[in-house]
Amino acid sequence: MSIFNFSAGPAVLPKEVLHGAAEEMLDWHGSGMSVMEMSHRGPEFIEIAATAEADLRNLLSVGSDYETLFLQGGAIGENAIVPMNLLGNEKTIDFINTGEWSKKSIKEAKKYAQVNVAASSEDQNFSYIPGRGRWKLSNNAAYVHVCTNETIGGVEYHWVPDVGATPLVADMSSHILSRPIDVSKYGVIYGGAQKNVGPAGLTLVIVRKDLLDRALAITPSAFHWKEQAEAGSMLNTPPTYAIYIAGLVFKWLLAQGGLAAIEQKNVAKAKLLYDTLDASSFYSNPVRKEDRSRMNVPFQLRDESLDAAFLKGANERGLLQLKGHRSVGGMRASIYNAMPIEGVQALVDYLREFERSHG
């Protein structure tokens, strides 16, 4: 029986990556060492990290006016690290509130700044992205923060907000590397790795160089982007094995044809699942169609008393981790880059089977 892991994160990794890591577990390229045993200052790991950074820049077409950092702390950590690095002499941060992860960012930022929620979709239970025309931005915000894919609520920006000269900061944790993006439209892009990039423990930060002199004096050295950039992300010991796995994922993505090719696959997977849900009155998805996430698909059964039976049957068929987040309930299928379309087809087949037997 094939197993398909629909976990929201830590999430499924490409099998080719896992096989490659297994083959190199005890001896990386004849070094006699596992990557987990290497000094981050040694030539072997320096090569691994440099190659990973170069491949990431290649995948996203990151310009020379940006730094790419491999850090720790996760996206929740960055919710504090971002304001510490970007507030400078300003007092206010603008936020667009589109769900649970936006709310976490807002809560953390309030410890350092005045927060202006410039727009929110809470009025409809975070089921849509507020249109740009509704945003009430401040005149002097240090930056505008958006979460471009809400992992829990399943809403995704399919457009880039224009916020003028104010830096646009984006938490892209759950859809980074799932599609091409224009990095130049953002001041900062950050994300935890455990969705589309690699294992938990690594955080990616892409920051425009002209923003590196805004850090508050209280910013710890390990979280100070300028200091980390000057140290090649090695001011402290980095998450070495997570960087190594991320590097293998980058190679895998390049071998797939890059982000334009992987986007086509992600569009096909999402369409297959959403079309099935939309064709049924037994299931429902709460998100406005134009704002639906390609990565995270929440859905509900018409009769929630059947939820336990649905999950039990799914597990028996090797369809794992479909239970929705505890804050919203229902079901959620996370169909990241490494989820093959065969996995989505297996889920669709089960959705139809369960409806036939319980509808």
Image: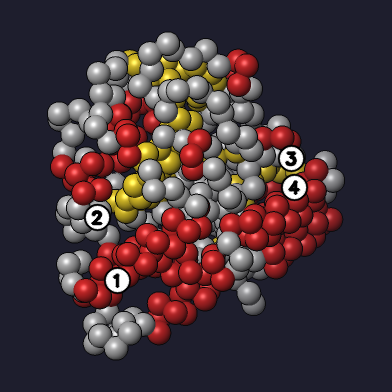
CA neighbours of label 1 inside 10 A, class few (<14), some (14 to 19), many (20+): few
Tell me which amino acid carries mark 4: Tyr
Give the structural element (helix, strand or loop) at label 3: strand
Q: Nearer the viewer, mark 2 or mark 4?
A: 2
In the depicted view, which residue is nearer to us: 294 or 7? 294
Location of mark 4 (residue): 274
Which comes before the other along the chain, label 4 or label 1?
Answer: 1
Location of mark 3 (residue): 284
User: At 18% across and 34% down in the image, what residue appears?
Assistant: 219
In the depicted view, which residue is nearer to us: 28 or 88? 88
Location of mark 2 (residue): 232
| Residue 47: numbered disc | 1
User: At 73% across and 36% down in the image, what residue appears?
Assistant: 289
User: At 20% across and 28% down in the image, what residue appears?
Assistant: 216
Which comes before the other along the chain, label 2 or label 3?
Answer: 2
How far from the left and from the top, in percent, is residue 90?
A: 29, 17
Which comes before the other along the chain, label 3 or label 1?
Answer: 1
How far from the left and from the top, in percent, is residue 30?
A: 29, 88
Examine the rendered structure and indicate whether residue 277 appears above or below residue 136: below
- Evaluate if marks 4 and 3 touch, with contact meaning CB atoms under 8 Å apart: no
In the depicted view, which residue is nearer to us: 334 or 210? 210
Tell me which amino acid carries mark 1: Glu
Which comes before the other along the chain, label 1 or label 2?
Answer: 1
